Amino acid sequence: MSDPETTSSSDDGVFYLCRVGTIYLIAPKGEEIATQVEEVKKRLEEDTRVLWVERSSRSADFTRRFYVYPTARQSEPDEILHGTDAMSAVDFDRPLIFKVVVPIKNQPKHHEADDIPTDTYWIAWNGIVAMVLWEQNSDTIPRSGGHVALKVMEDAARNAGYDVYNQACSPACSNVFMHSDLIIRTDPSVSECTIEDASGTTVYVTAPEREDEATLLRRVFFDFHNACETFARQKNIGRRIMDLEVEAWGKVSHLLSHYSTHAETTSLPLLKSLSSRWRNRGWRAEVRALSAQAWISMTGIEILLREWKREKGRFLDEAREIMPVFQTDYVEDDRRVGATDLSKLESLSSQVESRLDNRLVSFATAGGAISGALMGAMITLLGG
C-alpha cells in the first residue's frame, strides 16, 4: 500500500477545509471490537475509491461499546418507550485514516449544489467521529464537498456485515456533517490546533505545519475528537429525551380524551348514554395501559436527563476552547432539553387517574345499589 501523497501545507495561499460529522459504526456485541475494526479496514482496502488506509495499533483496553438511539422517525412508539431500538455502536479510539479519490462527476450533490471542490479527500473515522479534509482553493465554501465520504463508509461497514448511523443535527436535517466548516491554515510556530476566529458557520483554525494531509488530519482529529465525541453522545441522549417527552404527552393526551368522553357519557341520562357506553366498552383497560406507559416515559426521561447533564458537563469541559465548532448545532438542543419540566405531565396524569378512579368507585357504588334494587324486586315478584 502506497504512502499518502505529500503536499506542502506551507505554500502561499494553500489552506484546507475540514468537515466533522457523527457517523456511528453499528456492529453486534458478539464480536470483538478489534475484529470489527479490521473487517471495516479490510473492506476499505478492497474499495477501488480508497487509495490507502492506515490505523495505529492500540490496546483493546482503549476501545469501548455503547448504545445509541435512532430518531423517532426510524422507530415505533413502543420501541422508543422501552428503549428496545437502541443500537450497539463502537469506538475504536485510534481512527482509521484513509484517502479517497472519486471523480467529481460521480460524487453526490448536496441540495443539488453543483460545487464539488475536488476529487480527493482525506478521512479520519473512529466509529463515532468522522472528519473529512481536502485542499481548498477558493474562499467560497462548497455545499457539496466531502459528502461522498459517507457513501464510502456506509459501503465498507455494510460489506463487513455492519451498518452506520449518521446523526444529523435534527431529524429533519439532511446535512451529513455539522453546520460548522473548519478553515485550516498551518503555522510552523504553533504546537497544537487553535481557533483563531469564527464567522457564522465558518471557523478558522491554525494547525501545526505537517508534511502531508494525512498527518495534518491526524493532528486535527486528536486535538478535537474528545469534544466531538461528548457532543455526539449528549446530542443523542438529548434527542431521545425529546422523543420520550413527545410520547409521554401523547399518552397523557389520550388519557384526557378518555376522561372527557367518560365525563360526557356519565352526564347523560342512562338510556341516552347506552350507545356511548357500548362504543367505549373496554376503555378502563386502555386507560390503565396508557397510564403505565405515561409513567414509563416520564421515568425514562428522568433517568436520561441525569445522564445528559453528566455528558453536558464533560462536553463543556472538553469544548471550552473550541466551542465555535459546535455552536450552531448545540444551542437549540441544549435549550430544549434543559427546559424539560415533567411537573405538568406528572400533575395531569395524577389528576386524571384520581378522577377516573373516583368515578369508577361512584359507578361501582351506584351499580351495586341498582343491582340490589333489581334483585329485591325480582325476589318480591317471584315470591308473589
Image (cartoon, helix red, strand yellow):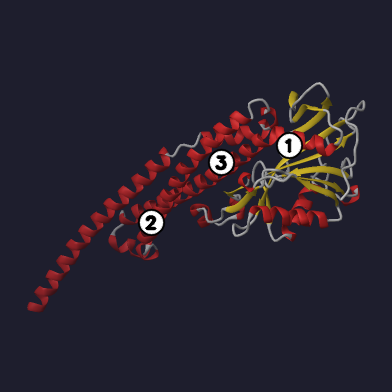
The image quarter in which residue 115 lies = top right
Amino acid type of the residue tagged 2 in the rendering: Val
Mark 3 surroundings: few (<14), some (14-19) or many (≥20) residues within 10 A: many
Measured in 3D between alpha carbons, the distance from the residue under mark 1 to the one under mark 3, in whole angstroms, is: 24 Å
Q: Residue at x 49, y 54 (%)?
A: 82
Local SS, label 1: helix
Q: Which mark is residue 221?
A: 1
The span from disc 2 to disc 1 (Cα, nearest Å) is 52 Å
Image coords of residue 11 (percent x, y): 92, 28
Mark 3 or mark 2: name the one nearer the start of the chain: 3
Q: Earlier in the sequence, mark 1 or mark 3?
A: 1
The dot on residue 238 is 3
Disc 3 versus disc 2: distance between alpha carbons?
A: 29 Å
Quick one: which residue is furthest to the right in this view?
A: 12
Q: Which residue is mark 2?
A: 287
Closer mark to the observer between disc 3 and disc 2 = 3
Label 2 environment density (alpha carbons within 10 Å; few <14, some 14–19, many ≥20): many
User: From the viewer's perspective, is the residue at label 2 or at label 1 nearer?
Assistant: 1
Q: Do we see residue 335 in this rendering?
A: no
Q: In screen coordinates, is 351 left or right of 372?
A: right
Residue 222 x/y as whole percent = 71, 35
- Quadrant containing the C terminus in the rendered view: bottom left
Hey, what amino acid is under mark 3? Gly
The spot of residue 258 in percent (x, y) is 39, 54
User: Seen in the image, is 380 located left or right of residue 361?
Assistant: left
Q: Please name the amino acid that badge 1 sits on.
A: Phe
Q: Residue at x 77, y 27 (%)?
A: 205
Q: Residue at x 80, y 27 (%)?
A: 208
Q: Is residue 322 visible?
A: yes
